[in-house]
């Protein structure tokens, strides 16, 4: 089946300067996403259509969770357990490279709940970003490097393949995932089409297709597991940043975007830039595995 998205609506939420890190919590049917540059955490109840916004004192880049409902957030300074009621943070891993302008950027769990996360040069100039695997409190293993901006990652349905985005290079890499969680056989999987800007956040659906947000490309692209472009879906915003499947049947698709440095004229042309877009999909997504409890 050729994947298709049927546009539904734009969430009535504040526009984000840099919307990112979207995550779905099935037990509460809530969506979480972040605004990295105007640091905020958004919590959206998809049933009640109710929004809660919490400011952060530093860039917050992504959201995940451990069972049943413990939120995990990735910030510029590291990874934390986060209580949205008290707004308390408990450090899990400290980013010792923050002084070098290297911050966290994106993250995803594999099918066993291991957390993989990327870092980037906040000035977007040096190839100083890396891909890590969280190993425990205070411990993370660097498993790939050479990224100006690390995005993704995402995992195939079987969990045997990891996809990692090098945004500046406009390449999506594929790796084999070994039983011990290490990566091998790095290869160039997709060379991004120049007319669609730069690859950003990614996810995988239940048929093993890879969905890619297009920064500067006004679209999301869908590729097969063989690397064949299946379809492109127009988004009414230039800077599309991330995508996730959600809802009881995992056919609700939510897409984040950014205002970036858009001019008043550009904002007039694209008034929904920075918002979250909602679509229905003919193909279901796959539920993201919660992060395994930390030892």
Image (cartoon, helix red, strand yellow):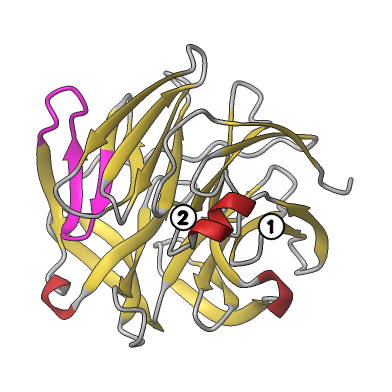
Determine whether 289 is above or below 235 in the image: above
Residue 50 picture quarter: top left
Residue 56 picture quarter: top left
In the displayed structure image, the side of residue 33 where residue 92 appears, left or right: left
Q: Residue furthest right?
A: 1
- Residue 138, position as x, y percentages in the image: 12, 58
Determine whether 224 is above or below 295 in the image: below
The answer to whether residue 273 is seen in the rendering is yes
Q: Secondary structure at mark 1?
A: strand
**Looking at the rendering, in which quadrant would you find the C terminus?**
top left
Q: How many tags in the picture?
A: 2
- Residue 59, position as x, y percentages in the image: 24, 55
In the displayed structure image, the side of residue 210 where residue 126 appears, left or right: left
Q: Secondary structure at mark 2?
A: loop
State the residue position of label 1.
Answer: 219
- Examine the structure image and report whether residue 77 is included in the region drawn in magenta: yes
Q: Residues within 10 Å of mark 2 (few under 14, many from 20)?
A: many
Q: Nearer the viewer, residue 23 or 288?
A: 23
Q: Residue at x 43, y 64 (%)?
A: 261
Instruction: Say which mark, if any, is on residue 291.
Output: none
Q: Residue furthest top?
A: 48
- Examine the structure image and report whether residue 133 is included in the region drawn in magenta: no
State the residue position of label 2.
Answer: 259
- Residue 201, position as x, y percentages in the image: 52, 58
- Residue 252, position as x, y percentages in the image: 64, 31
Q: Residue at x 49, y 62 (%)?
A: 263
In the displayed structure image, the side of residue 47 where residue 33 appears, left or right: left
Determine whether 241 is above or below 292 in the image: below
Determine whether 65 is above or below 114 in the image: above
Residue interval drawn in magenta: 72-88
The answer to whether residue 240 is seen in the rendering is no
């Amino acid at each position: 089946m050729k994947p298709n998205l049927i546009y539904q609506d734009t969430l009535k939420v504040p526009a984000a300067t840099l919307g990112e890190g979207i995550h779905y919590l099935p037990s509460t049917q809530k969506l979480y996403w972040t605004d990295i540059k105007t640091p905020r955490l958004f919590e959206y109840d998809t049933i009640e259509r109710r929004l809660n916004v919490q400011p952060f004192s530093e860039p917050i880049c992504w959201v995940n969770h451990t069972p049943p409902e413990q939120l995990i957030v990735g910030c510029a300074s590291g990874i934390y357990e986060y209580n949205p009621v008290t707004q308390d943070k408990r450090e899990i891993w400290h980013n010792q490279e923050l002084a070098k302008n290297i911050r966290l950027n994106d993250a995803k769990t594999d099918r066993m709940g291991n957390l993989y996360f990327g870092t980037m040069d906040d000035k977007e100039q040096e190839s100083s970003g890396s891909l890590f695997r969280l190993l425990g409190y205070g411990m993370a293993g660097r498993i790939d490097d050479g990224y100006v901006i690390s995005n993704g990652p995402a995992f195939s349905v079987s969990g045997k393949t990891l996809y990692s985005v090098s945004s500046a290079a406009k390449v999506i890499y594929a790796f084999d995932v070994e039983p011990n969680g290490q990566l091998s056989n790095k290869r160039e999987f997709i060379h991004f089409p120049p007319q669609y800007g730069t690859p950003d956040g990614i996810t995988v659906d239940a048929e093993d297709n890879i969905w890619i947000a297009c920064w500067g490309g006004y679209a999301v692209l869908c590729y097969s597991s063989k690397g064949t472009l299946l379809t492109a879906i127009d988004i009414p915003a230039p800077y599309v940043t991330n995508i996730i499947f959600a809802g009881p049947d995992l056919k609700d698709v939510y897409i984040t975007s950014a205002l970036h440095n858009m001019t008043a004229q550009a904002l007039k042309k694209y008034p929904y830039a920075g918002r979250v877009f909602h679509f229905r999909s003919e193909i279901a997504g796959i539920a993201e595995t919660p992060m395994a409890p930390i030892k």
